[in-house]
Image (cartoon, grey):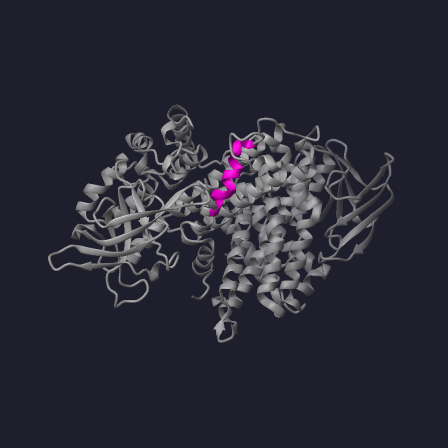
Amino acid sequence: MSHSTTLDQTAVGARSQPLRESAELEMVRDAARALLDAEWPSQQAAALAVRPEDLQRLWRHAVRQGWTQLDLHDRELGLAAALVLQQELGRAECPLPLADAVLCDAVLAGASGAAAASLRAALHQGDLVPTWCFGPDSGEADAYELVDKGSTFNARLSFVENTAIATHLFVVTGREREVLVVPMSTASVRATTGLARPALAEVMLEGADRFERIDTRFDLTTLPTQARLLLAARALGATRHGLDLLCDYARVRTQFGQKIGQFQAIQHKLANCLIGVEVCRLALVHAGTADADPMDEVRAATAAALAGQYLRQVVLELHHGFGGISFWEEHEMPRIFRRVHADLTRLGGVGAARAQLARSLLEPGARMPEFDLGESANAFRAEVREWLADHWDHRYPEETRGQPLNHRKARQDFSRKLGARGWLGVSWPSEYGGQARSALEHLAFEEEMAYSEAPVTFHNTAATMIGPTLIRFGSAQQKQVFLPGIARGDISFALGYSEPDHGSDLAGIRTAATRLPEGGWRIRGQKIFTSTAGFSTHVWLAARTDPAQQRHRGISVFMVPLEAPGITLQPMSGINGHRSNVVFYDDVLVGEDALVGELNGGWEVITAALAFERVSLAAIAARTRGYFDLLLAHVQTALKADQPLAADSLVRDRIGQLAAQIQAARLLSVNTAVVVQDGEVPVHQGAMVKVFASELMESLSEAVFDLVGTGATLEGGATSALLDGRFEYAVRDALLYTIGGGTNEIQRTLIAQRGMGMPR
């Protein structure tokens, strides 16, 4: 597409699922990138940025593409397009005043009168180049002084951007609906050098008498929020460009005889960077998506809060990854460093965004908002929630009180109730007894089960991992026997993967299955961390069937009844009260029909089973949301030293931070489901959910102890226990999430190799 293509040449289409940019937005991105690549080459960006004539020339090109005519209330090509363009400007290290223009158009569109119409026409034609001062409530300390005398005014305005090319200054006065529009030719401008390039400026106006008073219907109190969102988008574009640069460098740079991208330290650093960038990207897409009100301050504040927390840290890590090479001004990274830090501290930065979130959530009775998963998934979520209200009372039978916690949560009677609804095969094809629901409906189901802490442990592994894997790899007889049993809640599976010497390194397993002359197999070996073996009916066992082959070759998968002679369980007690097991296999005999898939083809079976688990990982994110709502309810009503706990500014900041992170975990979960719905395997996307949500569970619990104190560390029922002892348990339980299913360190390696193309 030519870079002269205009935005109104794109046809608007309905967006089919959440967190996906429409084809029209992709066209906007492509057109903008073509323009910037042609007119703003990266090797010249630093020099071009300080030459007003080059900025003005590029601005004319942008105007012809329609950048100054983005209507914030256009659900397709309004805010969403502005966020896309801001990211492209960040990627190109280009300081065009797009954000100022978008907000200028919104304010003028809400105004009446000839002056506003004339100014807006000049903006659309490119004759008006705006810059803003957002007034006394902008979040900038000591940045605003204005004395309005009616026919004249004096002002000292700090941190003003784009003064080198701006023709008009828009000033929020603090009076409802009023904006002053002042020609820059009447102002005295003094550059205030710092991280921002070009520099921010202090603008002085003495006895200014050439201005327009604009009265607008636009809600001016939302301007700082929208500006922070647009700045976050520009910072994200710059950060993503820096991450791409480091990935390219890591693939070719050799140190100590290896590409540095092969070093685990670099891979884990890159994985952390990708997670940080991705949660910010998803938050921006969510803020600009077609179902969003462009004035939705919660979505905007979430994106700004996440950007302020993660992107600056990512940029620091990128410099660390480059080492000395990126320290020097000849490299692009110093420009990216300045851009990201300058943008994300403007207008109160992360603190102001967190404060907004806290205000919305600390009203009595407030909870985290629902996530729109689309019409069918929303309806199914409501159905599941209603069913749970009738069938799950959040109580366990008294006779189970002395059992390990994971045994108490393995309620086969409950699993059978779900099976009777057809929900154990919620996403299975209908020909295998499933409901063939979409990945987003499956996500809604998993979220509701986790959020309500329903007792799903008996069936969970069988329904989410084993059933779908059997559908793909099982024989006709295996499907006929096992799939109906799983779907009814009669058959359950434990995973027999880890061994004492090989935990996450499944390719190193030694448990052996030897074929017998008369048919069938003899299994000898030992497994560890088989947590559900105490109540499951079968074990999904990985065993080596060809010892001559190394690593992942020569492994096969078997379905073994746990009641088979020769199986011995040695219980292990976890810090979270769960029971796991060491399982000994002493000459255990199974038939030929126990082999799943091809002989020695078990690695493909194992990999597929792990992939099918990805959507159910949303349970971790949903569990953090449940705990956070519990914390919110406490903070909303609690007192500390006879003062409302919610009034403490440090408490409010922490609540805002956690709220943004909870939303980030949900965004990652939804994105994983959408990848599945697109027909792809979410390998690194699922790993990101696991890493982020499990570590968030840890940090959430630790935050509660800081906010609530010793009472939160007591068990439920203990005198002086707070929050029903839930966080005393949660902090112990969170350790399992970071380790189980492959440690987070293994997940980070997977993210780097599969998601970022790092060499093995």
Image check: 218 left or right of 383?
Answer: right
Q: Quadrant of the C terminus?
A: bottom left
Q: Residue at x 69, y 65 (%)?
A: 47
**Residue 189 visible:** yes
- Bounds of the magenta segment: 722-735
Residue 731 magenta: yes
How many labels sit on residues?
Answer: 0
Q: Residue at x 30, y 61 (%)?
A: 510
Between 570 and 554, the one nearer to me in the picture:
570
Say above or below: 654 vs 38.
Answer: above
Give residue 239's quadrant in the image: bottom right
Image check: 294 left or right of 420?
Answer: right
Residue 41: image location, x then y, percent: 60, 64
**Residue 5 visible:** no
Residue 402: image location, x then y, percent: 39, 34
- Prevailing secondary structure of the magenta residues: helix
Image check: 409 left or right of 544?
Answer: right
